[in-house]
Image (cartoon, helix red, strand yellow):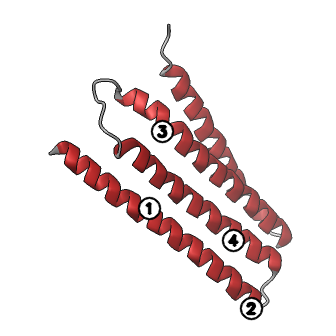
Amino acid sequence: MATFMRNFFSKVLTIIFFGLAAAIIFSLFQHIVDGIINQVDLTELLLKGINTAIIALAVFELALIIHKEYSEPEDDNKKDAIETLRGTLPRFIGTVCVALALEGLIMVIKYSQLDLAGNLYYPVAIIMSTALLLTSLGVFLFLTEKRK
């Protein structure tokens, strides 16, 4: 029964997250077309497009991780929780770090163009938290490494 529930919910969540990623991509294209038709500033349009694409990528990556980790036959006697986390966390955290770093850089560019230098605390905080997240991942991987 537990295996059935695990497989069922993993498939449902995978479909939901793939659907969300597709909807975000559709929204991205719609936003770009509307921006071109309404002659919105191209730089602003591209920055918003990159933001939306990054979110779609993170949602897509989450769907892939759920599908890979929970749809396959369960090998509880071969893999422990730490080993599973060592396999999935780096990939997902890496995607999140890329998304956060790009978001911070996009905010720096946007604030520079709008002469809002006083608001640079926000992108700096995002970039610093990205560095902290990546460092924490490295510490986790180091501490959970199997010594031979």
Where's residue 136, x and y in %? 56, 33
Earlier along the polypeptide chain: callout 2 or callout 3?
Answer: 2
Q: Is residue 82 above or below residue 126?
A: above
Identify residue for label 2: 37
Mark 4 lies on a secondary structure that is helix
Please tell me which of labels 2 and 4 falls first in the chain. 2
Instruction: Report whether 147 appears left or right of 96.
Output: left
* Residue 76 versus residue 119 in the image, above or below: above
Residue at 43% across, 44% down: 68
Residue located beneath label 4 in the image? 49
Mark 4 Cα shell of 10 Å, populated few (<14), some (14-19), many (≥20): some
Q: Are marks 4 and 1 in contact (CB under 8 Å)?
A: no
Marks 2 and 4, how far apart in space? 15 Å
Q: Which comes sooner in the sequence, label 3 or label 1? A: 1
- Horizontal arrangement in the rendering, residue 26 relative to residue 39 (left or right): left
Residue type, label 4:
Gly
Q: In which quadrant of the rendered view does residue 116 lie?
A: bottom right
Q: Of the residues shown, which amino acid type is indicated by label 1?
A: Phe
Name the element at disc 3. helix
The residue type indicated by label 3 comes to Thr
Mark 4 and mark 3 lie on one chain; the one further toward the N terminus is 4
Tell me the residue at 77%/86% (across/down).
Answer: 40
Q: Which residue is mark 3?
A: 88
Q: What residue did someone put label 1 on?
A: 17
Disc 1/disc 2 C-alpha distance (Å): 30 Å
Mark 3–mark 1 Cα distance, whole angstroms, equals: 17 Å
Q: CA distance from mark 2 to mark 3?
A: 42 Å
Label 2: which secondary element: helix
